[in-house]
Amino acid sequence: MSDQPAYGKVLLTFARNSLIRDMTFRTNFLLDCISSVAWSLMNVGFYLIIFTHADSIGPEWGWGKYEFFVFLGTTWLINSLVQAFCMPNANEFSELIRTGNLDFALLKPIDTQFLISFQRVEWSSLINVFTALVLLGVSLWHLTTRPTNPIVLNGVVLILYPLYVLTGAAILYSLTIALAATSIWLGRNQSLYDFWFYITNFARYPMEIYRRGWGLPLWGFFTFVVPVLVVVNVPARLLAQPLNPRAWWEWPLAGFALLATASSLLGSRWVFNRALLSYRSASS
């Protein structure tokens, strides 16, 4: 029999232990959930104000109010997965190095990157999965029942959407773990959340807004070099269908997203392992 650990069972154990820890401080957990929901509601309110002054984000792009709310719900869905499973662990990586606890992680009979990436689950961040699903449901109801040019959701779209949500989360995870691994070279990287905000901020809006004038270099860089623009745009476009019928380039973009996901995962794995080669044990 193989002596490799069952990673699914290990992940469930991490999740259960994290839930037990969070439930030990129920008031703090509840306040975190309320804070996340309040932040989401303020975002919706902000965009509702915008759409009282404009019918769409670019009339030729098709991002009307409810199309954009599908985009916003997809953003919440992907970010909540990354913030729940990846960000707390990546942010603590520098502390593992500083305190010497990375030595113990390296000695465990399990893949070091897996252990460091998922040993803690931030359950309060998953509340945004619920708010995202509510926003998606309301928006899709309006889009499928509107009297003019309603969208049609077929089985292919409903299967591909969760797949591309996961690919988007995988790209952001790759970026996060690669940034966290730089702690080995930098000594103590306490700016992970800053980097996270600056880079992923480009993924919070439809990619069409960058495809003119001075935004074109940003569109090219954050689509083909650091592919954060495909993280939300591909799954959101599948579901919202802002261009109905679809533009010719939408399906090639979806294919590129799969390639970008594989490249990001492999690249982050290489960076992580390369950084570990530079690590010097606290006992040495």
Image (cartoon, rainbow, N blue to C red):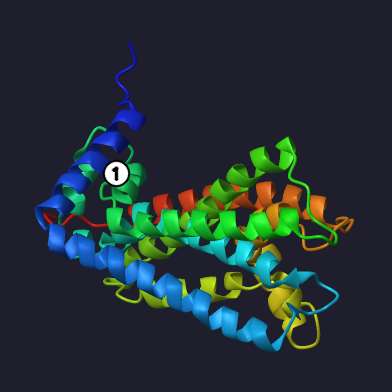
Residue 13, image x, y percentages:
24, 35
Q: Answer above or below: position of 24 versus 186.
A: above
Name the residue located 77 percent from the left edge and 55 percent from the top edge: 253
Rendered residue at 24%/44% (across/down) = 106
Q: Can I make out residue 227 in this image?
A: no
- Sort mark 1 into few (<14), some (14-19) or many (20+) by Cα contacts within 10 Å: some
| Residue at left offset 89%, top offset 56% | 248
Amino acid tagged 1: Leu
Whether residue 181 can be seen here: yes
- In the displayed structure, 85 sits above or below 32; it is above
Q: Residue at x 21, y 52 (%)?
A: 102
The residue indicated by pointer 1 is 115
- In-image side of 11 versus 95 (left or right): right
Give the x, y percent position of residue 232. Answer: 61, 61
Q: Quadrant of the N terminus?
A: top left
Give residue 178's quadrant in the image: bottom left
Which element carries disc 1, helix, strand or loop? helix
Q: How many dots with numbers?
A: 1
> The C terminus is located in which quarter?
bottom left
Front residue of 160/95: it is 160
**Measured from the top left, where is residue 169 in percent x and y?**
51, 53
